[in-house]
Amino acid sequence: MHIGGTQIQTPTGRLAPHETIELHELLNFKSLSLIKMKQAVGHIADPQLKQLYLQNIEMTEAQIVELLQLLQYRPVIG
């Protein structure tokens, strides 16, 4: 599997169940962090701090997209 230009190897070509759970937890954390940053950025007066928040928002959005792409490799149950 390829994520962000990086080749990721798994023995089965799928994520293990515990990896899928970890992925969901990480997505939840990143999503909640993104919501909080987007809510806070409008209240920040300092231009440098605001720029840091905006950059972090951009990076977090890109990371969420990458993590969502990994979900296609979750195990097939059933």
Image (cartoon, rainbow, N blue to C red):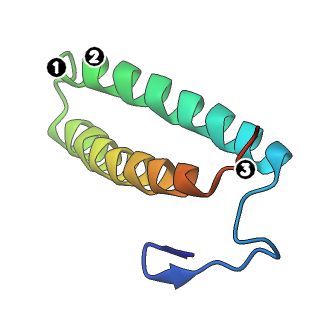
Q: Nearer the viewer, residue 55 or 15?
A: 15
Distance between the alpha carbons at the discs numbered 1 and 3? 40 Å
Look at label 3 and name its amino acid. Pro
- The N terminus lies in which quarter of the figure? bottom right
Amino acid at pointer 1: Gly
Q: Give the residue type that dot 2 points to.
A: Gln
Element class at badge 1: loop
Marked residue nearer the N-terminal end (1 or 3): 1
Q: Quadrant of residue 34?
A: top left
- Residue 45, relative to residue 49: is it above or below? above
Q: Nearer the viewer, mark 3 or mark 2?
A: 3
Q: Tell me residue 17's x, y (percent).
A: 82, 45
Cα gap from disc 2 to disc 1, whole angstroms: 7 Å
Q: Which numbered disc flags the more N-terminal residue, 3 or 2?
A: 2
For label 1, the residue is 42
In the image, taking residue 65 as reference, residue 19 lies left or right, namely right
Residue occupied by mark 3 = 75
